[in-house]
Image: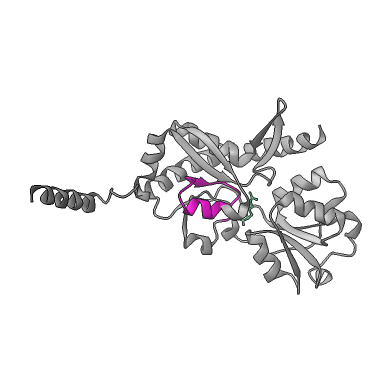
């Protein structure tokens, strides 16, 4: 009987503290600090935000988002662990709690807001169409791309942009942005939709490509933010504070500039 009462008391306390059966999202920040490690999910095929490069002959994941992740880890006083995966898997992996944050140029759309918490926005590039230079006169309007094969990254908002803003497109969804770039160059697709900063980085590395003279609608809803599990109140507060500081000090702009230069250099060496 005594044992039974004790377990009742334990269960009762658990309810009060709502702390049993795993960490609640509420104390996620404390849990990260306690573990000494910040696990960040990304998809490193998206220069200048996250990409692979050789540092002293060794493969390394770098980019503006990775500088941001490192700054956050430093401020929290923990080690940074980067988990690289297909973009399509980043939010699912975060949902399962296998990473603490998703930092991958993730657009904080209203749809995604339903399932995740997002920090304040840290970057907002417009949407662009990338084509071969030799097609520049041919593909210069939405109408001129009617019925064409248009690429977008699998699981990205660009899939919706292709479907909603282009005329009768044959959408081609591909896991990685560099593969899409290659497909445009080879002519297996006619164009691809990507955010400007990223498109510009790959165009700089592939001089036969350029932006088409076509205006797509962009919105504040597509700005990049850090994704967290739902109800990460204390963690979100901390992320917002850090991001605001990094924006105000010009640090985020600096990360993007430096990594754009690094991305250009990496492939030319
Ligand atoms: N901003 C777009 C989205 O959230 C594309 C992001 C792709 N990111 C990446 N690391 N490949 O859907």
- In terms of image quadrants, where is residue 78? top left
At 70% from the left and 44% from the top, the residue drawn is 47
How far across and how far down the image is residue 69, in percent?
54, 39
In the rendered view, does 162 fall on the left or right side of 94? right
- In terms of image quadrants, where is residue 28? top left
Tell which residue pokes out farthest to the bottom in this image.
168
- In terms of image quadrants, where is residue 84? top right
In the rendered view, does 219 fall on the left or right side of 268? left
Tell which residue pokes out farthest to the left in this image.
1
At 68% from the left and 56% from the top, the residue drawn is 126
Does the image show residue 250? no
Tell me, yes or no, whether the highlighted magenta stretch contains residue 89: no
How far across and how far down the image is residue 102, in percent?
53, 48
How far across and how far down the image is residue 117, in percent?
46, 54
Which span is picked out in magenta?
90-107
Residue 219 versus residue 64 in the image, above or below: below
How far across and how far down the image is residue 156, in percent?
63, 58
Does the image show residue 226? yes
Foreground residue among 121 and 51: 51
At 53% from the left and 42% from the top, the residue drawn is 40
């Amino acid at each position: 009987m005594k044992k039974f009462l004790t377990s009742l008391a334990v269960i009762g306390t658990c309810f009060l503290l709502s702390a049993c059966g795993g960490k609640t999202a509420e104390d996620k920040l404390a849990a990260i600090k306690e573990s000494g490690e910040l696990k960040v999910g990304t998809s490193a095929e998206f220069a200048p935000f996250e990409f692979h490069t050789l540092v002293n002959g060794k493969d390394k994941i770098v980019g503006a988002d990775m500088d941001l992740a490192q700054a956050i880890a430093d401020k929290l006083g923990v080690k940074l662990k980067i988990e690289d995966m297909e973009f399509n898997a980043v939010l699912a992996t975060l949902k399962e709690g296998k990473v603490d944050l998703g930092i991958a140029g993730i657009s904080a759309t209203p749809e995604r807001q339903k399932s995740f918490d997002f920090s304040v926005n840290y970057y907002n590039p417009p949407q662009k169409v990338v084509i071969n230079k030799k097609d520049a006169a041919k593909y210069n309007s939405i109408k001129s791309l009617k019925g064409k094969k248009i690429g977008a990254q699998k699981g990205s908002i660009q899939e919706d942009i292709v479907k909603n803003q282009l005329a009768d497109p044959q959408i081609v969804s591909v896991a990685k942005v560099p593969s899409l770039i290659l497909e445009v160059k080879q002519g297996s697709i006619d164009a691809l939709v990507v955010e400007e900063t990223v498109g510009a980085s790959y165009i700089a590395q592939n001089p036969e490509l350029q932006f088409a003279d076509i205006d797509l609608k962009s919105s504040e809803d597509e700005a990049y933010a850090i994704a967290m599990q739902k109800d990460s109140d204390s963690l979100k507060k901390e992320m917002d504070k850090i991001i605001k500081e990094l924006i105000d000090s010009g640090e985020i702009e600096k990360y993007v500039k430096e990594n754009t230069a690094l991305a250009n250099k990496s492939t030319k060496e």
